[in-house]
Image: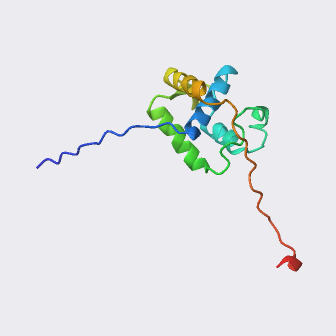
């Protein structure tokens, strides 16, 4: 007995968040840098540490602060799956890095023809680590 499974064809729609990721990859491409997935997550979330500090002036720095690293990683994976981004292998580091594909460049240029190029930077909400007894 054989079971036939029909896959429904789904349309992948790029939202503004996907365009922010593509724009981040294009900024790296213009600087001739291949970033890791982790570095892209840090930049979009606005993490200020020694690895992301040189890229603090990117337009997309801290524009997806409410997204988790897992969600941004999944979004990057979807961009790779649908050929908007590509993975580049480094033999020296034995790791994969990211780059913008031609389809991603075309999609980003079409987006910027219709929309403004400035992203809204968001400040992460700082959670209090302690409370004075008088405030309770």
Give the side of residue 132 with respect to residue 77, left or right.
right
Give the side of residue 18 with respect to residue 48, left or right.
left
Q: Could one spot residue 93 in this view of the protein?
A: no
Quadrant location, the C terminus? bottom right
Can you give x and y, in whole percent of width and height, for residue 62 in the image? Answer: 71, 43
Q: Residue furthest front?
A: 114
Residue 42 vs 113, above or below: the answer is below
Residue 38 vs 100, above or below: the answer is below
At x 54%, y 38%, the residue is 76
Is residue 87 or residue 93 the one in the foreground?
87
Give the side of residue 85 with respect to residue 31, left or right.
left
Residue 46 vs 59, above or below: the answer is below
Give the side of residue 86 with respect to residue 54, left or right.
left
Can you give x and y, in whole percent of width and height, for residue 75 in the image? Answer: 53, 41
At x 61%, y 48%, the residue is 69
Q: How many marks?
A: 0
Is residue 30 or residue 125 the one in the foreground?
125
Q: Could one spot residue 23 in this view of the protein?
A: yes
Q: Residue furthest left?
A: 1
Can you give x and y, in whole percent of width and height, for residue 18 in the image? Answer: 55, 37
Residue 121: which quarter of the image?
top right
Residue 90: which quarter of the image?
top right
């Amino acid at each position: 007995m054989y079971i036939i499974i029909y896959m429904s064809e789904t349309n992948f729609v790029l939202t503004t968040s996907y365009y922010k990721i593509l724009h981040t990859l294009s900024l790296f491409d213009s600087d001739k840098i291949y970033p890791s997935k982790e570095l892209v997550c840090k930049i979009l979330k606005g993490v200020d540490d020694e690895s992301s500090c040189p890229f603090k002036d990117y337009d997309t720095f801290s524009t997806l602060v409410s997204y988790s690293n897992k969600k941004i990683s999944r979004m990057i994976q979807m961009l790779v799956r649908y050929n908007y981004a590509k993975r580049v292998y480094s033999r020296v580091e034995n790791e994969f890095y990211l780059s913008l594909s031609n389809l991603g460049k075309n999609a980003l240029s079409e987006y910027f023809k219709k929309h403004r190029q400035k992203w809204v930077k968001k400040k992460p909400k700082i959670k209090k680590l302690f409370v004075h007894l008088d405030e309770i």
